[in-house]
Amino acid sequence: MDNAIIRVLLVDDDEMIRDCVSAYLEDEGFCVHSAASGEEALELITSLRPVVCISDMRLPGILGDEFIIKAHALSPATGYLLHTGMLYSLSDELRDIGMTSDAVLLKPIHDLSKLVNKIKHIAVAGRSV
Amino acid sequence: MPIKPGEIFFKSESRYRMLVENSCDIIFSLDTDGNFTYISPAWEKILGHVPSEVVGHNFRDYMHPDDQKGCAETIANAVRTGKMGEFTYRIRHVDGSWRWHTFRGTPHVDENGVLSIIGVAHDVTERLRIEEMMAHTEKMIMVSGMAAGMAHEINNPLGAILQHAQNIERRVSADIPANQKAAAEVGVSLDLVRGYLEKRGVFAFIGHIRTAGIRASEIISQMLYFSSRGESGVVNVDLTAILERVVGYAATDYDMKKKYAFRSIEVVREYAAEPVFVDIALQEMEQVLLNILKNAAQAIAASEMHREPRITLRTGLSNDMAQLEIEDNGPGMDEATRLRIFEPFFTTKEVGVGTGLGLSVAYAIVTKGHHGQIEVQSRQGEGSCFVVKLPVQGRA
């Protein structure tokens, strides 16, 4: 599969994280968009319909898990990954939309090629890991 | 019939005697040299010695050496000012242990003009133990909140360091078409750029940045572990079996073998005759015990004691709790160290030898993860004993 057709939406309020993760994913040829809050990402998600959406947990407005629930309602075909700096156990609501502990990425990701593999896996499987 | 004056004296004397002899607190008198001249029967109930054997002895014969000076000063001060003095000190129980007592004493001059100190002492050991435990718990809650906050704040910048280092490596890679394109646009050869960076060791520097970042991130993840708890399967196992597994790991651990000569340490097993089953997250508890064992081996290795190194392992039941002990005959620790031993980043080891996280992670796993207790008893020059208590969950 050509990575260029895989749209990725990255949600993180930290510009440094948006920059370094997008730089890597762009080098891999993905089509990367980013948003600094859940609210901003919700506005993008219907028009963008990303294959994968990677969201930070601690966001300035709605939190990452709440954002994913709302985004899933708008774009159910998107696979969601939670990128968090804290140990996190998935809530029942997130499990209900098909997320598993494989979809939780602990910050900092030491090697971004692992993220690339997850994105490709979701793209091939059609949905959440 | 009228009561004679002598009779009143006799009655009031016997009443006071009864009060003194039935008091739950110890009532005593000391002469100005600190020798006991009277001790009420409560002494025997509280400290175990027969009062008649204590009378005539000096208070210093029973008091902890570190507390004697303060006590003598309190007595001298009471004598000088004529006012009541109060002092808290450790006193020897007949079983050899120290008990904390508080006494309040007043100078008294009898009808013959002889000055003495009359005092009341009561046992505050349990109260002090609870106060210490509460202060400790409060401190650990605060520290664990700080650890979680810090870990979270550090993870993003650490991510940027690690990931940008990776980005730099990739942006000079010949495999990415965009790199070739940009190089052509500015008129340089990517191969020459790579050759230069290689020659000047820049790739190695970038590698070091990543290695250092990963090391920092591992410390942060241990801190997160201290402040919250990962999910892991709970199993019902016998304490003896876990201890044996951990001793097995310790024997093959690189640091234990090379740095602390674990094989030369005699391991004494004083296990309970019956198995003691507990519900535990196996990997977590193994980490706890390995951390304690490592700490014991390190303490022994660092000491200059000239005795055969020994670690004693015990299992058993105590007040409906499963209990295990890991005791070493290393140098022990002072009270200030003992009180701080479970704090994150508290270490007595040299910089680079320990992060000071091992025992704090052990503390978090036992108390938060397993609703148990962990404490350490220590005597300087004699060794330390870590005691882990876990709720008993019946037998498998």
Image (cartoon, coloured by chain):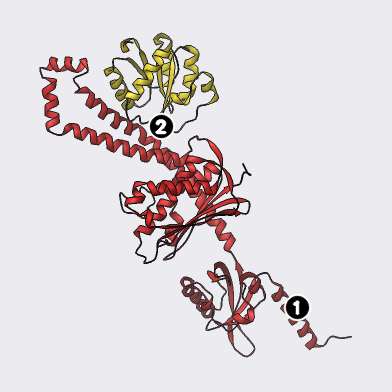
Q: Name the residue tied to disc 2.
A: A85
What is the quadrant of the N terminus of chain A in the image?
top left
Question: Residue B306 has which mark?
Answer: none
Foreground of the two, B396 or A98: B396
What kind of element bears circle 2?
A: loop
- Chain B: its colour in the image is red
Classify 10 Å Cα crowding around label 2: few (below 14), some (14-19), many (20 and above). Answer: many
In the rendered view, tell whether residue A103 sits above or below residue B229. above
Query: Which chain, by letter, is yellow?
Result: A
Q: Label 1 marks which chain's residue?
A: B
Residue B289 visible here = yes
- Which chain contains the residue that carries disc 2? A
Helix, strand or loop at label 1? It is: helix
Report the amino acid beneath label 1: Arg
Residue B83 percent location from the top left of the image: 56, 76
Q: Mark 1 = which residue?
A: B15
The residue drawn where x is 46% and y is 11% is A77
